[in-house]
Image: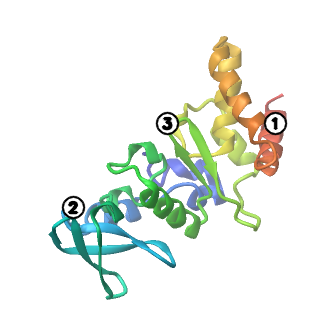
Amino acid sequence: MSSDAEMAIFGAAAPFLRKSEKERIEAQNKPFDAKTSVFVVDPKLSYVKGTVQSREGGKVTVKTESGETVTVKEDQVFAMNPPKFDKIEDMAMMTHLHEPGVLYNLKERYAAWMIYTYSGLFCVTVNPYKWLPVYNPEVVTAYRGKKRQEAPPHIFSISDNAYQFMLTGEWRNIFKKWLFLRENINVLSETVKYWISSRAEVV
């Protein structure tokens, strides 16, 4: 994980790409009870955070963040990830990888305008519906030549890694990336434009 000083190469884009050192330290020191901290199914919000009060006969009683007490089936309660995983850049690293955990992480990252998130091999993008300074030439340069784990999630990272794979003859990996983009071209049209423009910067 890069320090704030190392993130300086991303310029104005840095806070839109990675949590600050201060935020990471605060998350690691946040009190957390792994046995009682859960997400529970909610009819309006899909899932809400809560604390387990009791478990009996396949039923779980949970007190939600809003103060409401609900009793649901065991399969409607999902273990929460420790706070150190809040806004995690690669969701494949989560302790508990499930729908509420993924949705919560994407929501928290989106609230901080961190629109790119990895999920294993894939880069998930959530449209911010506003301009963010994450496509500037200095950002293209900052991603150039970096391995995926050396920089925050971004389409430029995918682009540069694909380019490096092409240069080294690792065609199988590049084919997977191209296939994914081709299948999702309508959804990713804006992202593809930025990807292509980042390659144009290299040539």
Q: Visible in this render: residue 192?
A: yes
Residue type, label 2? Ala
87 sits to left or right of 77: right
Q: Where's the N terminus, which quadrant?
A: top left
Residue type, label 1? Glu
Which image quadrant for residue 32? bottom left
196 sits to left or right of 33: right
- Outermost front residue: 57
Residue type, label 3? Gln
Q: Name the residue under label 2.
A: 34
Q: Mark 1 points at which residue?
A: 201
- Outermost bottom residue: 67
79 sits to left or right of 201: left
Which residue is depicted at the point 64% across and 57% down? Answer: 13
Q: Visible in this render: residue 87?
A: no
The mark found on residue 149 in the picture is 3
